[in-house]
């Protein structure tokens, strides 16, 4: 069973596919929590030691050394935070990969996410003839009935009767879809990797707040 934080990342990918919003709630994974705890404990001990010694410092040189050490402690804290944030997204990518491969995990269904990614891309492009580029696994699972099913969702979301066709050549990516407007040569990349990479920078501050609270 996946951690609550990872579930929220997956929920965000699904919600973004449906509404194209950038709202996310993340919690740290086990490894991220360990990094955070160890870094905070070490930093707090170091600060306490420095402040205790600082009471006995008198010379300007000693004061300079104290200031430099405090800066070093802050730098180490920031490095630990970056490691924890990267760890959270790495774990989310692993869960997305497992979800795409297995089709379902916990209460998430990959088919629903894929269909919503196709529909959201179709809302962006204006053409009425779209090509769906899938990976090898998803390309094999699509048939006429699947195309009809996703076509109904696209029509419901866009209000247009859009012709959907599968690209002859699949591409290599984790999951999701690349949607091409064959009439205007417009391409929308809604692959899982691209979605996750976009989120990583957009919500970096939000992730840090969830991992470290007000200790920013």
Image (cartoon, rainbow, N blue to C red):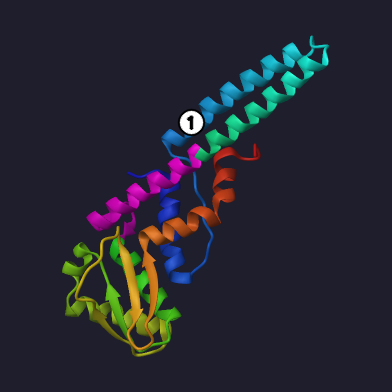
In percent of width and height, residue 108 lies at 34, 57
Residue at 48% x, 33% y is 33
The residue lying toward the viewer, choosing from 9 and 126, is: 126
Residue at 34% x, 53% y is 96
Is 23 displayed left or right of 161 in the figure? right
Q: Quadrant of the C terminus?
A: top right
Answer yes or no: is residue 104 visible: yes
Q: Which residues are magenta?
A: 83-109
Residue at 55% x, 54% y is 203
What secondary structure is marked by label 1? helix
Asked if the stretch drawn in magenta spans residue 168, the answer is: no
Is 35 displayed left or right of 74 in the figure? left
Q: Quadrant of the N terminus?
A: top left
Instruction: Name the residue at the front extreme.
Output: 61
Is 73 displayed left or right of 52 in the figure? left
Reply above or below: 123 against 72: below
- The quarter of the displayed image where residue 66 is located: top right
Reply above or below: 50 against 206: above
In percent of width and height, residue 188 lies at 40, 73
Instruction: Name the residue at the top extreme.
Output: 56
Asked if the stretch drawn in magenta spans residue 94, the answer is: yes
User: Which residue is the site of mark 1?
Assistant: 35
Q: Callout 1 environment at 10 Å: few (<14), some (14 to 19), or many (20+)?
A: some
| Badge count | 1
The residue lying toward the viewer, choosing from 146 and 184, is: 184
In percent of width and height, residue 147 lies at 24, 79
Look at the magenta stretch and give its main secondary structure.
helix
- The quarter of the displayed image where residue 121 is located: bottom left
Is 55 displayed left or right of 99 in the figure? right
């Amino acid at each position: 069973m996946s951690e609550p934080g990872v579930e929220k990342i997956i929920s965000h990918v699904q919600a973004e596919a449906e509404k194209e919003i950038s709202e996310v709630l993340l919690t740290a994974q086990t490894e991220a929590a360990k990094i955070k705890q160890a870094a905070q404990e070490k930093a707090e001990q170091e600060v306490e030691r420095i402040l205790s010694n600082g009471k006995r410092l008198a010379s300007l040189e000693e004061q300079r050394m104290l200031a430099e050490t405090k800066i070093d402690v802050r730098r180490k804290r920031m490095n630990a935070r970056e490691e924890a944030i990267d760890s959270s997204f790495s774990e989310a990518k692993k869960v997305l990969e497992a979800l795409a491969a297995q089709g379902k995990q916990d209460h998430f269904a990959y088919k629903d996410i894929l269909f919503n990614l196709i529909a959201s891309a179709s809302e962006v492009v204006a053409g009425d003839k779209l090509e769906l580029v899938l990976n090898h696994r998803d390309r094999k699972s699509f048939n006429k009935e699947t195309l009809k099913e996703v076509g109904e969702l696209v029509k419901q979301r866009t209000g247009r009767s859009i012709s959907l066709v599968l690209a002859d050549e699949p591409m290599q990516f984790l999951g999701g879809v690349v949607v091409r407007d064959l009439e205007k040569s417009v391409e929308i990349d809604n692959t899982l990797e691209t979605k996750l990479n976009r989120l990583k920078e957009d919500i970096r501050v939000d992730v840090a707040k969830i991992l470290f609270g007000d200790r920013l």
